[in-house]
Image: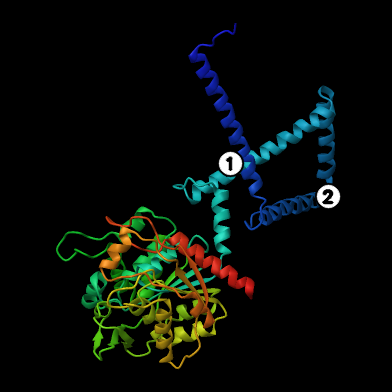
Amino acid sequence: MKERIPRGRKSLRWRRKSSQRARSFDLFGRFQRALSWLLPGLVVKRWMLISVFGLIVASFGLIIWADLRPIYWGIELIFSLIGVITKFLPSSITGPILLLTGISLLIWGQNRSFKSIQKAVAPEKDDILINALRAKSRLNRGPNIVAIGGGTGLSTLLMGLKRYSNRITAIVTVADDGGSSGILRRELGVQPPGDIRNCLAALATEESLITRLFQYRFSSGTGLVGHSFGNLFLSALTSITGNLEAAITASSRVLDVRGQVVPATNVDVRLWAELQNGDRIEGESAISEAKYPIVRIGCFPEKPPALPSAIEALENAELIVLGPGSLYTSLLPNLLIPQIVEAIQRSKATKLYICNLMTQPGETDGLDVSGHVRAIEGQLAIFGITKRIFDIIIAQNDFPPSRLLDYYLSRGAEPVKCDVSSLNAKGYKVFKGLLQSFKKTTSWSVLRHDPERLSLAVMRAFKNDRRDI
C-alpha cells in the first residue's frame, strides 16, 4: 500500500519543480538572447571585433615600447600559474573549469553591459534590448514608401505600414476647410492641421500619453469645443516657426515619429468643383456634400507648387501608394499639383491605388472601382497626361450581408464593386482581399479599412510586383 503524501507537501514539491523549470527556461532564454547578438544586420559584431582588435594592437604597441620585456614576464607568469593550479587538479579538470568560467563571465558581463545601456537609453521600456535592436534593424531595411492622400484613410494606412518600414513619407492634402481645421485656417491664417495631426499620431512610435494628448479633442470651454490639442499645437508652432513644415518637424520629434509627414504644398489652397448640372461650388466641405455628380475639380491658386521635400521623397521612393480616402477631397487635390504628378510619372517605384470600401453620398454615388479610376485618369488628362500613373489596384472582396451594411445602405452608401476582368483588360493588376475592420472605433461600429490587413495587402502586392520585374 502506497504512503499518502500530505496535500501541503505535494503543493510544495510542485512549486519547487515549477521554480526549477522556470529557472531552466530563464537560463535557456538568456543563452538564446546571447546568441542573438551574432545574427546579421544588427551592426554590433563588427564593432565588437574592431574593439578587440584595437585592444590587441594597443597591447602590442605597449609591449614593443617596453622592449618586449612584458611578453617574457607574461609568459613566465602564465606558466607559473598553470604549474601551481595543475599541482592540485589535473589539466583534464582544470581546463574545462577555467574555459566554462571564462565564458560565463563573458556572457554575464555582456548581459549586464547591455542592460545598463538599455536603462540609459530607454528606462521606461520593458522590451529586451536585443529584440528592440533587431526590430529597428528590420524596419530600417524596409522599403522607401510614399503614401499620398488625406483624411482618416491615409492615417489608417500609415498605422499599418509603420510595422514594415521606418522609411515612410506621407504627402498630405492641405485643402480642408471644415471643422476645427477650417476655423483655425480662417481665424489664424494657417494651413489646416487636422489631416497632418492624424498622420503624425499614426506614425508615432507608440501610443503613449503624449500621442493621446495630441489627439485629445475639447468637449467644453468657450471657443475650445471641437478643437483638438494637436491642431492648436501645430497652429501655434506654425506661428512661432513661420511655416507648417518646420512645425511638423518639431512635432515629429516630440511624438518620435517613424518617417516624415509633408504637406503637399505650402500655398493656401481652396478647392472648387464643377457638377454635372453645370453648377460650380467652392470649398472642400461643400464639395463633400455635393447634390449632383462631380465632373472635375480644381483649385485656387491654379497649379500650386509642391514642397521640395515631397518631390525628393517621390524621387527616392520604392513604393508609391495613392489612397484610401475621399476621392475628390483627399486624393485628387494632391494631383492638382503638377510637380507631384510629374514626379510620380518619372518614378520607377511600384505604384498602386487603394480604392475605398464604400461609396460616399454626394461625392462618389454609383461609382465602382473602374469609376474611381476613370475619375483619376480624367483629372490627369487636364494636364495632358494620358498614361496611367499607377498599375496596381487593391480593392475589397464582396461584403457578406450584415446589419451594419444595411445601415450604410439606408444612408445612401453602397459597397464599391470591382470588375476585375475589365480592369485587367486595361492593363491593371488587381488584388482583392478582406480589408475591412471588425473593431469598434467609436460607440457604434463603422466600416473602415483595417490597418494590419490593408498594409499586409500592400506589402504583398509590392513584393509580387518586385518579383515580376
**Residue 297 visible in rendering:** no
Mark 1: amino acid: Arg
Q: Residue at x 71, y 34 (%)?
A: 101
Q: Residue at x 45, y 70 (%)?
A: 395
Q: Residue at x 24, y 79 (%)?
A: 286
**Residue 154 visible in rendering:** yes
Residue 223 as seen in the image, left or right of residue 285: left
Residue 227 as seen in the image, left or right of residue 297: left
**Residue under numbered circle 1:** 112
User: Which residue is at the front of the view, 32 or 396?
Assistant: 396
**Element class at badge 1:** helix
Residue 74 location in percent, x, y? 81, 40
Residue 62 location in percent, x, y? 76, 50
User: Which residue is at the front of the view, 155 or 119?
Assistant: 155
Mark 2: amino acid: Asp
Count the marks.
2
**Element class at badge 2:** loop
User: Which residue is at the front of the view, 188 or 147?
Assistant: 147
> Residue 223: which quarter of the image?
bottom left
Please determine whether, in this image, residue 340 is positioned above or below residue 453: below
> Residue 464: which quarter of the image?
bottom right
Q: Residue at x 21, y 76 (%)?
A: 187
Query: CA gap, disc 1 to disc 2?
Result: 37 Å
Residue 447 location in percent, x, y? 35, 63
Residue at the far left: name it.
222
Q: Which quadrant holds the C terminus?
A: bottom right
**Which mark lies nearer to you, 1 or 2?**
1
**Residue under numbered circle 2:** 67
Q: Which quadrant holds the N terminus?
A: top right
Please determine whether, in this image, residue 35 is positioned above or below residue 461: above
